[in-house]
Structure formats: structure tokens, C-alpha cells
Amino acid sequence: MSKSNRTTQEWQAADARHFLHPFTDFKGLAAKGSRIISKADNIYLWDSEGHKILDGMSGLWCVNVGYGQQSLIEAAAKQMAELPFYNAFFQTATMPAIELAEVLAEISPPGFEHVFFTGSGSEGNDTIVRMVRRYWDLKGSPERQIIIGRINGYHGSTMAGASLGGMSGMHAQGGLPIPNISHIEQPHWFEHGQDMSREDFGLKAAGWLEEKILALGADKVAAFIGEPVQGAGGVIVPPSTYWPEIQRICDKYGILLVSDEVICGFGRTGNWFGCETMGFKPDLMTFAKGVSSGYIPLGGVLVGARVAKVLIEEGGEFNHGFTYSGHPTACAVALANLKLLREQHVVEHVRDDIGPYLAQRFAELNEHPLVGETQSCGMMAALQLVKGKTPDKPTGTAFASELEVGMICRKYCFANGLIMRAVGDRMIVAPPLVMTRTQIDEMMGLIRRCLDQTW
Ligand code: PLP
């Protein structure tokens, strides 16, 4: 029975009665009522009351090609009619999954010829834990169990994903982290490095990895995992010295290097993968989100030559997989998405045009009395809300946490028809990659208005 003629209040009441939302205070949601998003086109959303909203977050960092792309919609419909589902277990395969594996090998950095599909980024990172430990077992070093992640990193919400991540709120619930996961501090210059240059801080922050490896015992450490640019942690762009030094340290101790490309992959940073922008060569890469521009769930692990060789030649059966590993409809949509990104040169558009333009427009916000720092990388950017800026200390000082200035600013964004996310006092955007300069100007006008109202 169609319920499409319900009022917004009726939708909200049904929502509060039955739907437990992710990362949400269930009771608080019932009191306030959800904003119900009912349609979308290009970079805009509309809610159930007809308000137009500029989506500065690409849904949840995923709608890289924007909404309403016919070729993705048609690919899903065609594949659903032909073969909506078949699995990849027990010596079977489907054509879209095979073709997508080929295309991913084409666009990945040299040495990445193999992919393991999952349904999400979290499942991809769970796969990493099992694959990395399997690799070391097969290499005859089963004592290499520990995977090092970073405080405030985000790698998903499953037991392993949330353990690899370093979100204290997540670790506080459900008995996390799981054993043999360790963390180092994040490369956040604004918080930890203002007494030195960004480059020096990058080396110092990478050095925390070496200290941790030595403290744990190098022969016990299996891998290091990080997002090239931390997304959910607040778009923290590391100094240029950071990742090459991390690479050097991993190489020195023979530790596998894992790049979580769930946000940074598929053009977000101005290259196909964030590791290319940040100048390092991982052994494994997790992906999701932008691979299908979020039109349908899909994720996976791209496996570099060092690991693939051992798993394939010495591994026997890998006892791991998901019903939806290589889901044909999801793979067909991803193929259409990657075709669009390639044919419309979207990655180059980010690298050469709108990425630098977004950076320039964000840098202008440094003049605002509330803004202590701006950072950007491709089509992701952040501004840090501060108070008390002076010529001697243009980065200002942090607000007391109980003031929740970020939430106040976010409330104005909502009211002005802009989706911008608050991470503490850091306001972040990651808009669709197909945005034009005019649309960036429109977004920047809204951001300035929200900052003025917060001030
Ligand atoms: N890794 C990173 C870097 C992410 O940002 C996310 C989600 O935001 C994940 C992993 C988890 O992906 P998913 O929500 O698809 O499980």
C-alpha cells in the first residue's frame, strides 16, 4: 500500500516508532523528528517539505558523480532484469564482477592486479585484518598479529573496523578494540604541532609509528593502516612529509602498509587514489563509497603484488567472503560509474580545476574572525572554528568543548539549505566531484553566511 501521501509529521512519527538510525541518540531523534530527504538532482537534495539543500557532503562522502546520473540508473535496471543476483562462491562468477575487477586493475597504481569484493567499507577493513594475518601465517611469521591504526581514524563500524579506527566514542561501547590492535596519535598539526613547521611536524608524527613499533616489538607488528586524508576525523590533511616517512618506516621493518581509500578513492583527492596524491605505495587498499558513487552498496580490497602472490600461490582456500561479494547489480552500477568518471575526465577536473578552486576559496575564509585554520585536498575541505584570534596568534584558541560551536554552526547550515558536517569545532565539506566553479561560489556564499550568523 502506498504511503506517499503522508504528511512530514506522519513520516516522522513512523520513523521514531520503528527506525533505529545509525550513530543517533534514539530518544533525541524521536523528540526532534528526522529531516526526511525525498529527492535529489545533481548536487541538490529536497526534503519532504520542499526545501532545496546543497549537499556539501555528497551524501556520506560517496555520491562522487552527483545525483540523477541516468547511465548508473539504467545499468542497475538492465542488470536487475538480466541477472539481479548470483554469488561468487563455489567456482562461479558473473560478468559484471569479472569486468569490474579488470577495470579496477586498470585504474589502480602499478602492482594492483587483484580485488576481493565486499558489500561495504567496514567489511573491506574486516577483510584486511584476516588477509594481513593470513599473509603472515603463510610467510611463517604467525606472531605478526598486531595492526596499528590511528587515534581519531575511521575504518568502519563492524567489530574489526571500529577497532582499527581510533574513535574513543566507539571504543567506549561493545568491548572494543578487539585484541592485537594498537593506535598512534593522528598527524593533526593544528592540535599537536603548532610549535613547529608543518613539515617538521609531519616527520615527528610519522616517528610515533616507529616508536610504537619498537615498543611493541617489530616482529609482532603485521601492518599499519591509515586514511590518506582522515575524513570522518575532520578532514585532517597530513603534512607532505608524513606519508613518505610512514612508508620508509614500514619498509624498514617489513610491515604491510594499508591505505583506507573508502573516502579518498575514485577521484576525491584529485587522483584515482589518495595514496597517489599523498605520495606512498601501499600493499593493500580498501575501497567502497565512490566506486559506485553510493548509488548501490559495494566495497572491497585491492590486493597488491606482494600479498597477492603469497595468498594465491601458497594460500589454498581463503575461508572468508560475503553473500554480496561481487554482487552483479552493484558491479554493473560501479562499471557505469567508473565509465562516467573516465569519459567525463572527472578526476582531472578535480585535480586541475575545481580542487584548486575549492582550496583557494576555503583559504579566503582564514580572514574570518571565527576561522583559525583551513585545509583542503581535492574535493574535501575543513575549517577550524576558534576564538580570540590576534596578529600574534592567527590560529586563535579552541572554544571550551561544552559550547558546541560546531553544532551551532551546523544548525545555521541546516537553516540556510547547506549540508556541512561538524566534527567537534571543525566544519567540513566533501561535495560531489562534478561541481562547477559557480556551484562552489554558491556553497561558499552559504558557508560565509553561516559563519557570520554563528559569530
Ligand atoms: N573507511 C573509511 C575511511 C570511511 O570513511 C568509512 C565510512 O565512512 C568506512 C571505512 C566504512 O565504510 P562503510 O560505512 O561502507 O562500512
Image: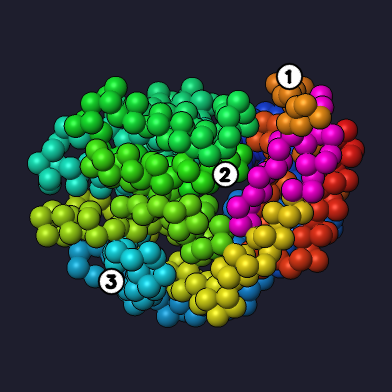
Q: Amino acid at mark 3?
A: Ala
Q: Residue at x 59, y 78 (%)?
A: 344
Query: Residue 10 in the image: x percent, y percent?
Result: 77, 46
User: Would the CB of label 1 be found within 8 Å of ligand 1?
Assistant: no
Mark nearest the camera among 3 and 2 is 2
Q: Which label belongs to residue 400? A: 1
Query: Which secondary structure lies at badge 2?
Result: loop
Magenta segment: does it hold 378? yes
Q: Amino acid at mark 2?
A: Val
Query: Residue 307 in the image: x percent, y percent?
Result: 23, 54
Query: Which secondary structure lies at badge 3?
Result: loop
Mark nearest the camera among 1 and 3 is 1
Q: Which label belongs to residue 20? A: none
CB within 8 Å, label 2 to label 1: no
- Quadrant in which residue 189 is drawn: top right
Query: Residue 357 in the image: x percent, y percent?
Result: 72, 60
Mark nearest the camera among 2 and 1 is 2
Q: Which label belongs to residue 93? A: 3
Residue matched to label 2: 237
**The magenta segment:** 363-390
Earlier-in-chain disc, 1 versus 3 = 3
Give the crowd class for mark 2: few <14, some 14-19, many >=20 residues within 10 Å.
many
CB within 8 Å, label 3 to label 2: no
Earlier-in-chain disc, 2 versus 1 = 2
Quadrant that contains the C terminus:
top right
Q: Residue at x 52, y 33 (%)?
A: 201
Q: Nearer the viewer, residue 139 or 15?
A: 139
Say left or right for 186 vs 38: left
User: Would the CB of label 3 be found within 8 Å of ligand 1?
Assistant: no
Q: Residue at x 88, y 46 (%)?
A: 449
CA separation in Å, label 3 and label 2: 39 Å
Q: Nearer the viewer, residue 169 or 220?
A: 220
